[in-house]
Amino acid sequence: MHEQAMNVASYGVEPGLRFAVLLDGIGGCRTLDMEAVRRWAPDDGVVWLHFERDHPAAAEWVATRGGFDPLVAEALLEEETRPRVESIDDGLLIILRGVCATPPEGAKDGPAEIDLVPLHIWADQRRLVTLRDSGHYITALRDIRLALDKGKGPKQTGELLALVSEKLVRDLEPVLDAMDEEVDELDELIFHGEASEVRERLKQLRRRSVQLRRYLAPQRDALNRIEHDDAPFLKERDKLRLREVIDKLMRFIEYLDAIRDRTGILHDDLSTVISERIARNSNRLAALAALLLPPSVVAGLFGMNVGGIPGVNDTWAFIIIVAFVAIISVATLMVLKRINWL
């Protein structure tokens, strides 16, 4: 069998194929080109193929050269998917979601924000095939690939599948930590920040938590089904590792529920603060109107263009009226302070 060994991990050398490696059974691997992939046979060893799902060359290989059942091939190339697991013959069709956090060095069009990327997987005794959309980068797969290059990677299909699942869930932790820190920050900003900004950030955070939970809950069920499946390539140690991954994922889901509840409480607090600000401003406007009422009444009375206005010919009349208005205003101010309007 033709094999191409490389000293460092390479990605996307051939159209549609991110990488292809043949596990050596002791933690290392050998990199394969597409010609070697076509010549691969199960007796050659466990192979891991990673494709770009939306690339025509990858779609052509999956549909015609991968040896998959037509329904499996269709599911692997499906665009809109949710986490699930289907047992077919001696293999597993698996759809999971992974965090696309940081693009690899040298990537031109990495995602600007953290996103959940669909990962389509086919696993059997001698082969693991993974597909993800082009333009997205799943750090979990890249970490495993680098570990294989260092001779510290998985040795067979079940171990590789368990490790993929573990690292997919692992990458959720910094996402949840960042969300928790943002909740703490918004808790402080509610009383000192701009209400419109806080409201918008709360809305985005709550939407993000709901979206994450929407995929993580079925992902937990999918991993639970893998752990209980009797696939021949899943060893007891692999299932124990999957069990730990499921427990961690359950904690993350509870963490998301707590974040969603906290954002709901913060939204209620923000509404209360806004209502208090509106009430306080209304009181101030009412107090200002009350302060201006006596001068307005006096000015209205003495500003009428009718006969009989007192003090028309009195030199001290204006000073007396100003003093009277000042006394009334001070008295009004004291009353307003006494009833806590100011």
Image (cartoon, grey):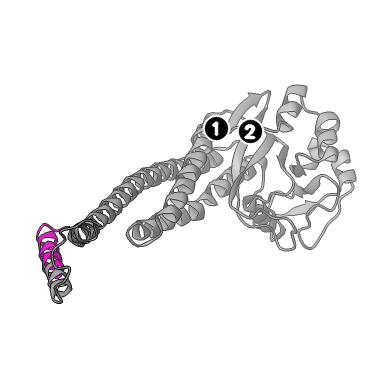
Q: Position of residue 174 (x, y in %)?
A: 50, 56
Identity, as a three-letter code, of the amino acid under mark 2: Ile
Looking at marks 1 and 2 on the same chain, the residue that comes earlier in the sequence is marked by 2
Q: Position of residue 101 (x, y in %)?
A: 60, 54
By secondary structure, the bulk of the magenta-drawn segment is best described as: helix
Identity, as a three-letter code, of the amino acid under mark 1: Ala
Residue 68 is inside the magenta segment: no
Q: Residue at x 58, y 52 (%)?
A: 114
Residue 264 can be seen in this image = yes
Horizontal placement of 183 versus 99: left or right? left
Looking at the figure, which quarter contains the C terminus?
Answer: bottom left
Measure how far apart labels 1 and 2 are at the Cα level. Answer: 8 Å
Q: Position of residue 285 (x, y in %)?
A: 27, 56
Q: Is residue 41 placed above or below 135 in the rendered structure?
A: above
Residue 319 picture quarter: bottom left
**Which residue range is magenta in the image?**
325-342
Front position in the image: 319 or 267: 319
Q: Residue at x 72, y 32 (%)?
A: 76
Count every numbered label the image shows and give the total.
2
Residue 40 can be seen in this image = no
Q: Position of residue 304 (x, y in %)?
A: 24, 57
Front position in the image: 132 or 243: 132
Q: Is residue 90 placed above or below 276 in the rendered structure?
A: above
Q: Residue at x 57, y 47 (%)?
A: 168
Q: Which mark is residue 233?
A: none
SS category of the residue bearing label 2: strand
SS category of the residue bearing label 1: helix
Q: Are marks 1 and 2 in contact (CB under 8 Å)?
A: yes
Horizontal placement of 328 versus 249: left or right? left
Front position in the image: 65 or 80: 80
The residue under label 1 is 222
Q: Which mark is residue 94?
A: 2
